[in-house]
Image (cartoon, rainbow, N blue to C red):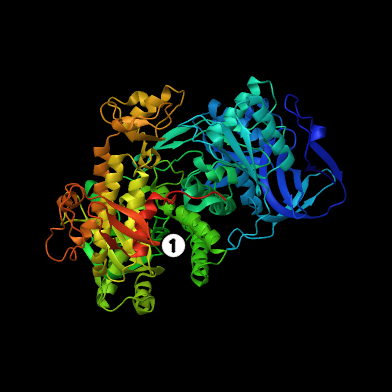
């Protein structure tokens, strides 16, 4: 057997790497080799290329025969013409007439086109499609790794066993672990971390930090040629499996390639030097009411490149979750990190279809069935929302249906091809008596989500039994998070207009079932003496006097499961929860807008400033610090004792703001551009900032976020990264003050504090003149304009010092510490530390 394994090859810049120097031939009899699948791609000469991390620690590159088949359906005469065209164009093709199954129409007569070399398949398909655009194509544009994964049931970074012949060609491969196992058996990856010193979209990097293990090197960018050579030598020496590069896609690697070309150097970060990196353009698209920007991509061969700044939802589930999605979707790690979770669920549908002998259409074919106006009104309702009862509620139980919409698809066999089809034993959608659901065959979407549901349930069960500080917890939480997002988007893709098997009728059937199940759960809760405070699509908040432990709710939980036949779990038991009113009508509740304390002192917030990405950091941190203080109280009424200190902290922040003591970095605002720059008639703040950065050669597209400061006058913003920093006098302090007070009022209004009261206390230095019961007897007189609360140290104890009279008022040490954390902590809800 002849295989190749990598070595630290000599690849000096300026000299093209020689294949013989880059690879060491290695011969010995090896009937079986075990290891982890790293990468799969096609090569013009070798066919399929498979990279393996061996159990012995070596990195192996093998070849494999893997012919690709796609299918074409249409009129017989046109198929005959296509046959002749393909025969004349490529003699290496195998063509034959056969029958294959379409998901909606059943068996079809098709032309099967088999391409011996997978590297040629896409070229053959697109030439055929261009010449014969009216024919229907199936299985024509599937990712190569997805085909391979579906055929052999192997997956990226999955452990497998290979049998390889004397020429290094794989004859047999099989998985040693299932993708549906909870525990991950991952290889020891060689990881290289690369990061510039500043965000290249808002500044000019001066150096790179490159880390491998515990070592870090700093590479100056002042000498471009030297920087390229130094990084190339580190890549050669350490031969990483994973390059974790911040801004690697749209700045680092394009910049390095530009430097290499400018200085006549040869720089190739691939492990396989016969390829150049696969560079893909940036693009923007509109989805679910917003513009999304996908940055340029740089994909490598033989190793993995992940850019956390260009990875979808990386902050939600990090690398462990990315590996999990690669396992279950069958996509490569590089692709799954950059693609949306919608692409992941589509890939899973494709894999199920391939295994079941169902053809995957190149484009969507099914359209919405005709409906009368009455039918449209009856079917297009969405989920159930029961407006929350505004105010603070203690001992509230949140009961959540476990992945409700996917569970409905699984339990009731809801899929695009089953809804509206009677079959032998149909069931009918509640509230839609004319809509049957076929139960004779397993639906494609139901079969896709079923193992996802089971695996996520097993992970959540393992987490419940696991200690708080168990070293496995963080990894399992990331795995669960990645599976959750796949399950979240599967509902949208069930009716998405561009989804290959999307059909709005299936989407409507799921929401109809959800409405029925939530109402059943409400009935059960009320039968058990609970008061329903809020319902939101897939969960409900209930309250019963004296019920504040999970054990006390088990009977209700089991009764809901029996009535709905869907798994539910107790998501949280809140010590207290505050449902916030609408800004326009204080008597009207806003669905899913609240903050509360559960399971001891954990904080959960929805749709308030601390969860918004456009909240300036100093406002975010102060609101979070106040919530942490509030989390200490077992009873809501106890919080009134903390209000004087909370007001002091807010007022001190306003004073610091006006005195210029808050760093500009903590005042930055992030806004997303909703269109291309030249499409703005009246520039938004983000567009105005982007135009300022354009003068430095920076480019921005629709969907990208821009950092800036609010300033007085026109254009009203100062882009972050401009050479000259703004003058303090130009900062629009009134705008920041308004944003601050608005955020503080969000959390204080639950005490009955109106915005006018807050302005009086903080801005106009009024005393605590409030309606009875809102505040305890105040210890401090805030009438004087000279009042300036400050934190100070006195005999090792933190105190609040009123400097205009010199009196010292003792404050609870923990509360004071939490309230000043915002000025010192780097903690952010939306930031994660890379591995």
> In the displayed image of the protein, which residue is found farthest to the right?
28
User: In the image, is residue 282 above or below residue 170?
Assistant: above
The quarter of the picture where residue 630 lies is: bottom left
- Residue found at x 21% / y 50%: 762
Q: Position of residue 620 (x, y in %)?
A: 35, 49
User: Can you see residue 612?
Assistant: no
- Residue found at x 66% / y 21%: 263
Q: Position of residue 690 (x, y in %)?
A: 38, 28
User: In the image, is residue 8 above or below residue 796?
Assistant: above
Task: Write down the residue under mark 1.
Answer: 439
Left or right: 265, with 182 as reference point: right
User: Can you see residue 437?
Assistant: yes
Q: Position of residue 698 (x, y in %)?
A: 46, 26
The quarter of the picture where residue 587 lies is: bottom left
Under tag 1, what secondary structure? loop
Which sits in the foreground, 571 or 609?
609
Which sits in the foreground, 96 or 292?
292
User: In the image, is residue 488 above or below residue 617?
Assistant: below
User: In the image, is residue 173 above or below residue 470?
Assistant: above
Which sits in the foreground, 816 or 133?
816
Q: Residues within 10 Å of mark 1 (few under 14, many from 20)?
A: some
């Amino acid at each position: 057997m002849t295989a190749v394994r990598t070595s630290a090859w000599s690849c000096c810049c300026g000299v093209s790497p020689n294949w013989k120097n880059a690879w060491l031939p290695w011969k010995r009899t090896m009937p079986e080799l075990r290891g982890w699948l790293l990468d799969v791609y096609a090569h013009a000469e070798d066919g399929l290329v498979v990279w393996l991390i061996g159990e012995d620690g070596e990195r192996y590159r093998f070849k494999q025969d893997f012919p690709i088949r796609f299918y074409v359906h249409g009129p017989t005469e046109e198929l005959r013409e296509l046959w002749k065209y393909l025969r004349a164009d490529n003699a290496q093709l195998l063509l034959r007439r056969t029958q294959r199954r379409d998901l909606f129409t059943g068996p079809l007569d098709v032309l099967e086109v088999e391409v011996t070399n997978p590297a040629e398949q896409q070229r053959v398909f697109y030439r055929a499609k261009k010449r014969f655009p009216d024919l229907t194509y199936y299985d024509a544009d599937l990712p190569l790794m997805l085909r391979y994964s579906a055929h052999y049931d192997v997956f990226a970074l999955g452990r497998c066993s290979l049998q390889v012949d004397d020429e290094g060609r794989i004859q047999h491969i099989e998985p040693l672990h299932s993708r549906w196992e909870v525990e991950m058996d991952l290889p020891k990856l060689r990881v290289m971390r690369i990061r510039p010193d500043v965000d290249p979209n808002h500044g000019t990097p001066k150096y790179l930090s490159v880390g491998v293990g515990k070592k870090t090197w700093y590479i100056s960018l002042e000498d471009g040629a030297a920087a390229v050579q130094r990084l190339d030598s580190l890549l050669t020496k350490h031969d990483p499996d994973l390059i974790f590069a911040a801004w690697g896609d749209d700045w680092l690697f394009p910049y390095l390639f530009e430097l290499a070309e400018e200085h006549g150097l040869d720089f190739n970060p691939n492990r396989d030097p016969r390829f150049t990196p696969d560079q893909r353009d940036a693009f923007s698209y509109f989805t679910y009411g917003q513009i999304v920007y996908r940055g340029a991509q740089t994909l490598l061969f033989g190793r993995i490149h992940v850019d956390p700044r260009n990875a979808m939802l990386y902050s939600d589930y990090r690398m462990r979750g990315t590996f999990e999605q690669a396992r279950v979707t069958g996509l490569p790690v590089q692709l799954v990190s950059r693609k949306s979770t919608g692409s992941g669920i589509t890939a899973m549908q494709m894999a199920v279809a391939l295994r079941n002998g169902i053809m995957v259409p190149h484009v969507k074919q099914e359209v919405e069935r005709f409906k009368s106006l009455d039918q449209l009104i009856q079917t297009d309702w969405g989920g159930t929302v029961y407006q929350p009862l505004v105010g603070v509620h203690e001992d509230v139980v949140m009961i959540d249906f476990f992945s409700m919409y996917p569970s409905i698809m699984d339990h009731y066999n809801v899929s695009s091809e089953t809804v509206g089809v009677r079959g032998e034993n149909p069931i009918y959608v509640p509230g839609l008596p004319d809509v049957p659901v076929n139960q004779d065959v397993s639906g494609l979407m139901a079969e896709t989500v079923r193992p996802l549901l089971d695996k996520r349930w097993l992970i959540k069960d393992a987490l419940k039994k696991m200690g708080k500080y168990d070293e496995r917890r963080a990894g399992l939480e990331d795995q669960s998070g990645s599976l959750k997002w796949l399950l979240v988007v599967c509902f949208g893709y069930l009716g998405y207009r561009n989804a290959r098997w999307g059909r709005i009728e299936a989407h409507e059937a799921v929401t109809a079932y959800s409405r029925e199940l939530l109402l059943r759960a409400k009935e059960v809760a009320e039968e058990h003496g609970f008061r329903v405070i809020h319902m939101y699509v897939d969960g409900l908040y209930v309250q019963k006097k004296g019920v504040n432990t999970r054990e006390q709710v088990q009977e209700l939980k089991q009764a809901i499961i029996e009535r709905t036949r869907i798994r539910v779990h107790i998501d949280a038991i809140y010590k207290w929860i505050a449902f916030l009113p609408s800004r326009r009508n204080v008597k009207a509740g806003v669905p899913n807008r609240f903050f509360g304390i559960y399971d001891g002192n954990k904080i959960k917030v929805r749709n308030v400033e601390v969860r918004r990405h456009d909240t300036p950091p100093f406002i975010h941190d102060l609101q979070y610090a106040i919530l942490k203080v509030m989390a200490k109280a077992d009873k809501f009424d106890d919080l009134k004792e903390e209000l004087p200190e909370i007001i002091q902290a807010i007022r001190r922040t306003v004073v610091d703001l006006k005195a210029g003591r808050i760093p500009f970095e903590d005042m930055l605002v992030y806004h997303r551009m909703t269109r291309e720059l030249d499409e703005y008639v009246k520039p938004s703040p983000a567009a105005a900032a982007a135009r300022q950065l354009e003068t430095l050669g920076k480019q921005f597209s629709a969907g990208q976020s821009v950092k800036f400061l609010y300033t007085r006058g026109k254009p009203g913003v100062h882009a972050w990264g401009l050479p000259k920093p703004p003058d303090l006098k130009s900062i629009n302090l009134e705008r920041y003050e308004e944003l601050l007070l608005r955020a503080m009022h969000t959390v204080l209004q639950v005490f009955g504090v109106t915005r006018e009261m807050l302005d009086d206390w903080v801005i106009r230095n009024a005393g605590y003149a409030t309606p009875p019961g809102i505040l305890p007897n105040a210890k401090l007189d805030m009438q004087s304009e000279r009042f300036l609360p400050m934190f100070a140290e006195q005999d090792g104890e933190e105190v609040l010092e009123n400097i205009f009279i010199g009196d010292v008022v003792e404050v609870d040490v923990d509360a004071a510490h939490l309230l000043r954390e915002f000025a010192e902590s780097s903690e952010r809800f939306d930031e994660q530390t890379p591995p």
